Image (cartoon, rainbow, N blue to C red):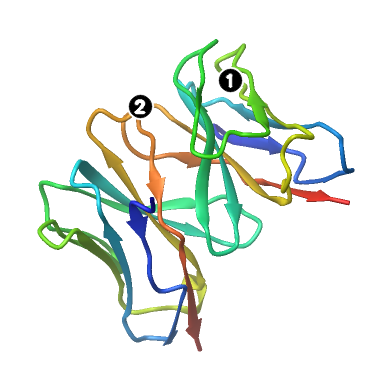
Amino acid sequence: DQQVKQNSPSLSVQEGRISILNCDYTNSMFDYFLWYKKYPAEGPTFLISISSIKDKNEDGRFTVFLNKSAKHLSLHIVPSQPGDSAVYFCAASKRGTSYGKLTFGQGTILTVHP
Amino acid sequence: DGGITQSPKYLFRKEGQNVTLSCEQNLNHDAMYWYRQDPGQGLRLIYYSQIVNDFQKGDIAEGYSVSREKKESFPLTVTSAQKNPTAFYLCASTAGAYGYTFGSGTRLTVV
């Protein structure tokens, strides 16, 4: 049962344009959502997060939007840069979970072309 | 600098062998986790531990074992019962309810 889904395995954009990565979830108990960025042969690094009491959180070039009614969140990167090329994982945590256990999506490979 | 150290970075295992992956953290985090990454499948939880001397199975615990004798250490043993152990293994820790710090991973290959 895949509770967090990233349906696009890959995304290719031009440098300077917007990248939009999408994530859907099925469990309405999830109350906190995170995006991680991962380079090959390295561990993921935290990028940005959002609580279920908000619908938007912004940090520099990165903005995460949450649509609770649709159980959907998205990560916007503007403007995209070649250094943003990586795998992006969406993750979710729920109330009452075992001390912060996260459920991850499958990941989306972002390629930003110069 | 505080962080999580995983070793070795690359590990080769022969058929039928047990191997142990190391994970050490100096962040004073209570909870530690082991994930496995396979292409197209994201990160899947193997085992996790909230406190010393206690741990729980994750979604894919079969063929793996762990121990948590010290707060700083959470080693993962891949046993011969794990039929498809070739993967990238990630250790993580957290101090609170949200968000992980990850190690740099161990690439395990069966030869």
**Which residue is at the front of the view, B66 or B11?**
B66
The image quadrant that residue B94 belongs to is top left
**Residue that mark 1 sits on:** B72
Relative height, residue A114 to residue B73 (above, below): below
Q: Secondary structure at mark 1?
A: loop
Q: Nearer the viewer, mark 2 or mark 1?
A: 2
Q: Secondary structure at mark 2?
A: loop
Query: Which chain letter matches label 2?
Result: A
Task: Kindly tell me whether residue A64 is visible in this rendering.
Answer: no
**Which residue is at the front of the view, A45 or A94?**
A94
Where, quadrant-wise, is the N terminus of chain B in this rendering? top right
Task: Kindly tell me whether residue A7 is visible in this rendering.
Answer: yes
Q: Which mark is residue B45?
A: none
CA distance separating discs 2 and 1: 19 Å
Residue at the image point whose x is 83% and y is 49% from the top: B110
Q: Residues within 10 Å of mark 1 (few under 14, many from 20)?
A: some
Q: Position of residue A40 (x, y in %)?
A: 62, 62
Q: Which mark is residue A98?
A: 2
**Which residue is at the front of the view, A46 or A106?**
A106
Residue at the image point whose x is 48% and y is 39% from the top: B101
Residue at the image point whose x is 88% and y is 43% from the top: B15
Asked whether the residues under marks 2 and 1 belong to the same chain, the reply is no
Residue at the image point whose x is 58% and y is 20% from the top: B72
Q: Position of residue B98 (x, y in %)?
A: 32, 36
Q: Amino acid at mark 2?
A: Ser
